Amino acid sequence: MASSRYGDPGVPIGTSFRTRQEVYDAGVHLHTQAGIAGTQPAAQSIVISGGYSDDLDLGDEIFYTGYGGRDPNSGRQIADQELKSWNWALVQNRDLNIPVRVVRGANPGNPYAPASGYRYDGLYDVIGFSPAEGRDGFRIFHYHLIRSPSQIAPAWDEVPTPIRSPGRTSRLVSTIDRDPALAEAVKELHGYRCQISGTRIDTPSGPYAEAAHVKPLGHPHDGPDALNNLLCLCPNDHIRLDRGVLVITEELEVASVASNEVLGSLITDEDHWIDPALLGYHRFIWTDLLRR
């Protein structure tokens, strides 16, 4: 029987269903057509079944495309997605740390999907969100999900051939390759001082800073894990950059996306060149693309 509960639906992970109606009746996904269900305070569940060409399913890791703008006949994106309703709700899963239920539908091109019908595959944490320009040239919203820990083994443990993707380490889970030496190098170049605020955090175990990628790694952005795509930032400014609160202008000034106000200049070092094209990409997705 359908209910509006969040988290565990009271249905064992790996449970199969013949139809979307059965999924609905079991209270796992409370919509018989839309891929996202629930809006307050966040989304309850998603269905991934290959409907959007920009989706990428890697088992324990999912890059999920938001709702809207797709031609149901051709499957192509024909309009920009809007940041409202279900799309907005799924952002709240990230911000409020509310896991979302994942249902997979049959998809011959996806070894993690069931052979037929639908299957409940457990809870996933939404760890990332950003606008992006999809393959068809329209604005989409992309969500990065990771399977929540401490759940029973997933149903695809016996997938014979793991998906291989450039720049990733292939197991049953494909994780983005990051070079820890690069992260350490950018911090040392700037003396662990934030390039935006100038803050240096000294702790009993030593200085602390974070290496932030300007152009995001992973699908669909595929930014490089390279020194020219890294900034040394404090945790607060790292979040502001990643979530589109701040951008870096062509003149290397730090600007507020909301007000367009210049807040200061990026602190630079002659031994650390930052690729202007990567800064431009970050500005594009959080200003031009998001506002159009």
Image: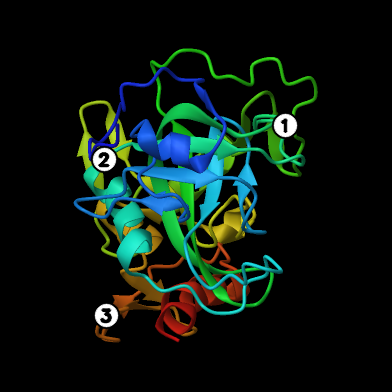
Disc ID at residue 258: 3
Q: Nearer the viewer, residue 162 or 109?
A: 109
Q: Is residue 113 left or right of residue 194?
A: right
Say if residue 155 shows up in the picture: yes
Rendered view: 269 above or below 15: below
Q: For residue 44, which quarter of the picture?
A: top left
Q: Where 204 sits versus 100, above or below?
A: above
| Residue furthest right as drawn | 161
Closer to the camera, 266 or 82? 82
Q: Is residue 141 above or below residue 153?
A: below
Tell me which numbered mark, 2 or 1, is placed earlier along the sequence: 2
Q: Residues within 10 Å of mark 3 (few under 14, many from 20)?
A: few
Residue 34 position, x and y percent, is 45, 56
For label 1, the SS is loop
* Kind of element beneath mark 3: loop
Spatial CA span between label 3 and label 2: 24 Å
Q: CA distance from mark 3 to mark 1?
A: 42 Å
Name which residue lies at 53% across and 51% down. 64
Relative image position of residue 87 (x, y in whole percent): 38, 61
User: Could you give the CA–CA distance between mark 2 and mark 1, rounded to whole angstroms?
Assistant: 28 Å
Quadrant containing the C terminus is: bottom left
Q: Nearer the viewer's eye, disc 2 or disc 1?
A: 1
Label 1 near label 2: C-beta < 8 Å?
A: no
The residue that disc 2 covers is: 97
Q: Amino acid at mark 3?
A: Ala
Residue type indicated by callout 2: Asn
